[in-house]
Image (tube, rainbow, N blue to C red):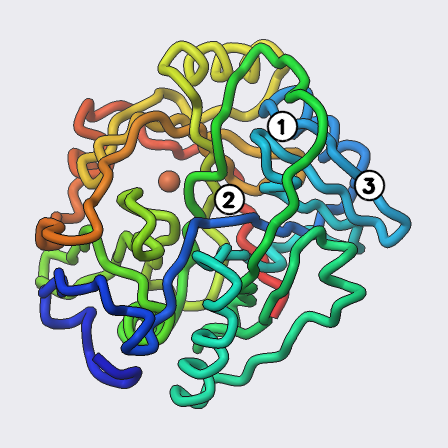
Amino acid sequence: MSPGTSRATDDTDDTDDTDDQERGMIRHKKLSSLTLNVSDLARSVAFYRDMVGLDLVEQNDQGEAFLSCNGDHHNLVLVQAQEASFKRVSFELEDEGQIAVAEKVLTAAKVKWTRIEPAECGRLRIAQGLRLADPTGIKIELVTGMNSRPGRHFPHPIAITHLSHVVVNVPDFANTLRFYTDVLNFRVSDYRHEPSGERYFAFMRCFPNPYHHAFALLAAAKPTFFHMAFHAKTLDDLMTGRNRLLKAGVTVAPTPGRHMASGSVFQYFADPDGFTVEYTQGMEEFPEEGARQPRNLDKTYATTDIWEGEKPHNLPNLGRVEL
Ligand SMILES: [Fe+2]
């Protein structure tokens, strides 16, 4: 399938993917990191370190703080800024050779991209990287060779294993979805639809990474950030994390729940700037070949939470995006 043809709209999930590299399709390792502009760096670093469960690995004189919950140098970058906003999301490609594949695919699809200069790659602790934007203007990096970090993961009451997913709202849903599926080679795991049948939510895995969704799009009037999720190692970690947040006076959604789409247990809460963060635990995984077809799930709250708990109505949901 070449860029520009439709994968997202036909409900098929091509299972013949072993020769993606030969066909010039981008292959991803995983969701790598999220970068947020924050209004008070020290306050946000303390929150993600002491409450959420990441380590502060490095802080530089550019006002950037790199935090990690695992052996990667970072999964979250916080940048001191005048006002808080979503800055960019980074995906790590399968290997160094994928940079050339990505350049070719993006150029063929007439997507503007730039190479991250070697000096900045050094500062970001990556080998190589490309920068681009989706049709909405959401900033994306495709990187390789994220450094491992030396030393032991600092013990924390909450064990989180990785950055699980990022969700954004976009105004031109169909066109933006086509970009992710046809150009970036993401695969839709499930859709949700309006009562009219129109699709408004797409959960995507960054192929061939197996997790149900690393990235998701919601249809909305303007581009906004919805939430980021960190994967808790066990349900005990998620629930202990929830109770620690409550005791600290953090704004926490009324109840945990379980998503129908991915089977994940979720608990939403707010960070100091008002960004929505999620602890998530457990997620459906897909094989590279022979994956099931995406489902069309309805818009009822029972689909969001099969336990039908109270909706997360108390979160500020800061959605500002740096475009
Ligand atoms: Fe989520």
Of labels 3 and 2, the one closer to you? 3
Nearer to the camera, 250 or 115: 115
Residue projecting furthest to the right: 61
Labels 3 and 2: the sequence-earlier one: 3
Task: Tell me the residue at 12%/48% (across/down).
Answer: 297
Q: Give the image quadrant in which the ligand numbered 1 is located.
A: top left
Mark 1 surroundings within 10 Å by alpha-carbon count, few (fewer than 14), some (14 through 19), many (20 or more): many
Q: Quadrant of residue 14?
A: bottom left
Q: Is residue 175 visible?
A: no
Element on which disc 1 rests: loop
Side of 243 where 48 appears, left or right: right
Instruction: Identify residue for label 3.
Output: 59
Q: Characterize the local packing of mark 2: few (<14), some (14-19) or many (20 or more) Cα atoms within 10 angstroms.
A: some
- The reply to whether the residue tagged 3 has its Cβ within 8 angstroms of ligand 1 is no
Residue 320 relative to residue 239: left or right: right
Image point (53%, 53%), residue name: 319
Callout 1 amino acid: Leu
What percent of the width, then of the height, locates residue 9? 15, 72
Dots 3, 1 in contact, CB < 8 A? no
Question: Any mark on residue 28, and which?
Answer: none
Residue position for label 1: 54
Q: Mark 1 and mark 2: span between their CA atoms?
A: 21 Å
Q: Are marks 3 and 2 in contact (CB under 8 Å)?
A: no
| Percent x, y of residue 120 | 76, 63
Task: Indicate the amino acid at tag 3.
Answer: Gln
